[in-house]
Image: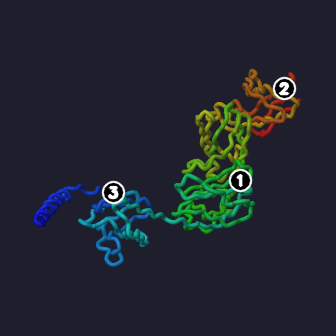
Amino acid sequence: MHAARLLLAALALLVAIPAAAQAPQRPAQPGQPPRDAAQVTVKNDGEITLYELYIARGGTGGRNWGPDRLGARVLEAGREFTVRLGPNFGCLADIRLVYEDGEEEIRERVDLCRERILVAARFVPMEERTFTLRNRTGLMVIQVFGRESGEREWGQDRLGNDVLEDGAEMTVAIPARGCEIDLMVVYVDNRAVEERRGIDACELAELTLAPGWLYAENPAALRPGQTGAGPRITLINRSGRTVFTVHVFPDGAANEGPDRLGADTLSDGATLDLALEPAPDCRYTLRLTYQDGTREERGGIDFCRLRELAIAPGWRDSPLGGVRFVNAGPVPVIALHLDQPGAPAGPDVLGDGIIGRGEAATIVLPDPQVCSYEVRAVFRDGRTVVVPVTDLCAAAEIVLSP
């Protein structure tokens, strides 16, 4: 009986062993990394070139970094490089990055099974480009903006709550990674804005705002008194359209300079007073953009002789110069005739325009070869004023009063 019991127990054990051997394996838990990292991609998303790259098994880097994985290569900004790791490397790695400027970065126990892309992002640090800014323009400076050349935004006003009076000076600091900066200066009337680009701030100890600084070959070397002040002019918009931008610059200048309107516009009938920088032979180019996007330009304008210019239809091709007619009467002037002696009466030179009470209009002479004219002005109340034959080439201003 005892032998039979032993035989039955042995048979039960033989049946249980195959069943246990055939039991399914426990599945891998979700989210667990693979056992080994085959490769890793290094991306340089910074600004400084990566010169050396070392990858060692985690916890061994301080003792043995091994070879530079880049070899004879370098990894420039915006590029990437894939490193193939040896068999059975494992997941954990120590990383050593050496940049162009000699700076090192070490990252310990990086899980390369999870982080398949290794990002290097080291940027050129900003430096304060500091210099003395002197104002010798004759106008108060209310804002100064500076930026690294190539940037799009001007950032904060470097004067803060201060202003820079004419004759005063102050220290200005412009943050930049490189040497070249742009400078924008806003004057007291908020319409006069000057902008100069590509100034070498690394060699700049002081900068004097004075007539001519905007176009000087080396603005840092410009000193007041080296050039005389440029002319002051008045532009009058009689085009029937709104002017959106006004650029006035010396003929042949490589840079058209700032928009003299700044954030403003010049509506029909409005005037704009400008102080210009000196120009060779006092010849300037005037470039306008209208509200509808059309542009007009004329060069060779002698603004030392012509201190007032009316922007009217045909101004680009008409003889420049003219006489300023001032309405000193109680009502608008609705017609103005310039008649040559002995010739038939001429047309109304105002066309569809008028000269309002207290206003003025600059009229180009009908024939630049003729100077003597009789002037007839008709007021809205019907009264007519006749100015006897006058040499209008020698007259800068004619006052009309009934």
- Give how far apart the Cα atoms at labels 1 and 3 are: 70 Å
- Mark closer to the chain start, 2 or 3: 3
As shown in the figure, which amino acid type bears the numbered disc 1?
A: Tyr
Check the image and report above or below for 391 versus 273: above
Q: Is residue 4 left or right of residue 379?
A: left
Q: Is residue 336 left or right of residue 94?
A: right
Quarter holding the C terminus? top right
- Give how far apart the Cα atoms at labels 2 and 3 are: 98 Å
Q: Quadrant of residue 75?
A: bottom left
- Element under label 2? strand
As shown in the figure, which amino acid type bears the numbered disc 3?
A: Gln
Q: Quadrant of residue 341?
A: top right
Q: Position of residue 72 (x, y in %)?
A: 29, 67
User: Residue at label 1?
Assistant: 187
**Of circles 1 and 3, which is in front?**
3
Q: Residue at x 78, y 27 (%)?
A: 336
User: Residue at label 2?
Assistant: 379
Q: Position of residue 102 (x, y in %)?
A: 42, 72
